[in-house]
Amino acid sequence: MKVIRRGVLRAGMALALCSVAFVGRANAAEPLPFGLALPLTGSQALFGADQAKAAQWAVDDINAKGGVNGRPLKMVLLDTQADPRQGINAVNRMISVDKVPVFGTAWSAVVKAVAPIANRSQTLELSVGANSPEIARLGDYVYTTYPLADVDIRLLAKYSHDTLKKQKAAVLYIHNDSGVEGARIYRDSFTAAGGQVVAYEAYDEQSTDYTGALLKVRAAQPEIIHVQGLVADLPQIITQLRRLGLSQPITTYSAGYNPKVVQQLGAAGEGLIVSSLAPSPELSPTVAKFVDRWQSSEHRIPNGLPYTQYLYDMPYLIADLYKHVLDSGKPVTGAAVRAAMISVGKFDLPMTGTLEVLPDHRVNKPVYLYQVKGGKFVPLATVK
């Protein structure tokens, strides 16, 4: 009986050990979810779809190398249509149904609309591609990975005055959150540098004829014109400026760093100066390979290359946060992921380089300026 009892005990212990090992392997392989809410349909779908594709590529690349401590990343992708109401629906579902501790999103109006949900549920929200300066003030659980408008637009205005030696500027801006704030930053920065804003004109985002605002700009006789618009309206605005005989240099922010804008502009785009918050293929071998991957897979370059670079980097940032939490032995919660963001502070990311997250929820990045020459973006300057 003693022999039998010892045998049973050994078998039970072996079974228990196997069960523990099995549970360990199961836990090790359990996916680590995160959310991504982008416009996959609607007017901004071309850009949202490419950003989502870039993020999925990064997830695949991370998982191909073993994931995070042996656990694969899992991306939950939902459509916002770039509409705040749809964004709220998407984020509510990701948090309540998919149980994500962290999610990324873009488009300033959406980022702002879902911020109360992130703060209330203690889910980390990463703004990846929106640039409203208000994003830095949306609450404890809202951070940006993308430099806000008061970085590139401020430096673009300063460059226009200090380097290009322009004393009088006109500002044209779309009447939405992004346009109003970006225009204000350019105006204040150009004035602070010693220049004068001689025209400051808004246009409706539903407009197709901007003649009224453009005639006021022409009457003011500026030396340089800054346009704070969207990809959809920039070609029309700039084309109409040129048709009215305005030959002054034109600048715009990172929305203009898009081959579709240049293609639509044709000759009217020559000389256009744009900012970018990510290095180009000419400046980075890694980005050159990224573009080659797009050409091989999609037979084109992505819509909004800098934005897709930040979206590719986002899963790497999240993987670093998850690793920090797992290594500390804590449960993977929104609070723990946020604490990891604050604790680590600096992240080395494949496409855009070092990301430094500041205590005020902003990030430090250089600004790259390009000028259209011969129908192509040519590096002009790097400013900080």
Image (tube, rainbow, N blue to C red):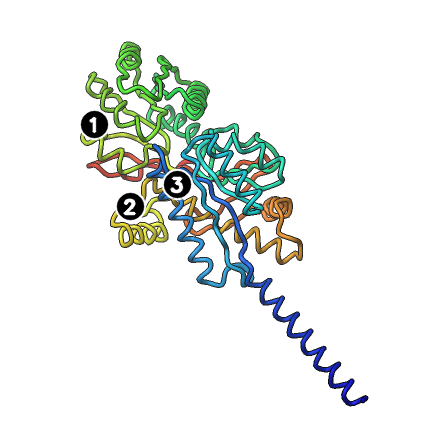
Mark 3 or mark 1: whose residue is earlier in sequence: 1
**Amino acid type indicated by mark 3:** Tyr
Sooner in the amino-acid sequence: mark 3 or mark 2: 2
In this rendered view, identify the residue nearer to me: 191 or 183.
183
The amino acid beneath tag 1 is Ala
Instruction: Confirm whether residue 136 shows in the render.
Output: yes
Q: What kind of element bears circle 1?
A: helix
> Counting other residues with Cα less than 10 Å from the Cα at mark 3, is it few (<14), some (14-19), or many (20 or more)?
many
Label 2 crowd bin: few (<14), some (14–19), many (20+), radius 10 Å: some
Which residue is depicted at the point 27% across and 24% down?
249
Q: How many marks?
A: 3
Label 2: state its secondary structure.
loop
Locate residue 157, reporting x and y percent. Answer: 39, 25
Q: Which residue is mark 3?
A: 307
- Estimate the x, y position of residue 6 in percent, counting from the top left: 77, 85
Q: CA distance from mark 3 to mark 1?
A: 25 Å
Identify residue for label 2. Answer: 301
* CB contact under 8 Å: marks 2 and 1: no
Residue 268's tag is 1
Q: CA distance from mark 2 to mark 1?
A: 22 Å
Q: What residue occupies the far front of the structure in this picture? A: 1
Q: Amino acid at mark 2?
A: Ile
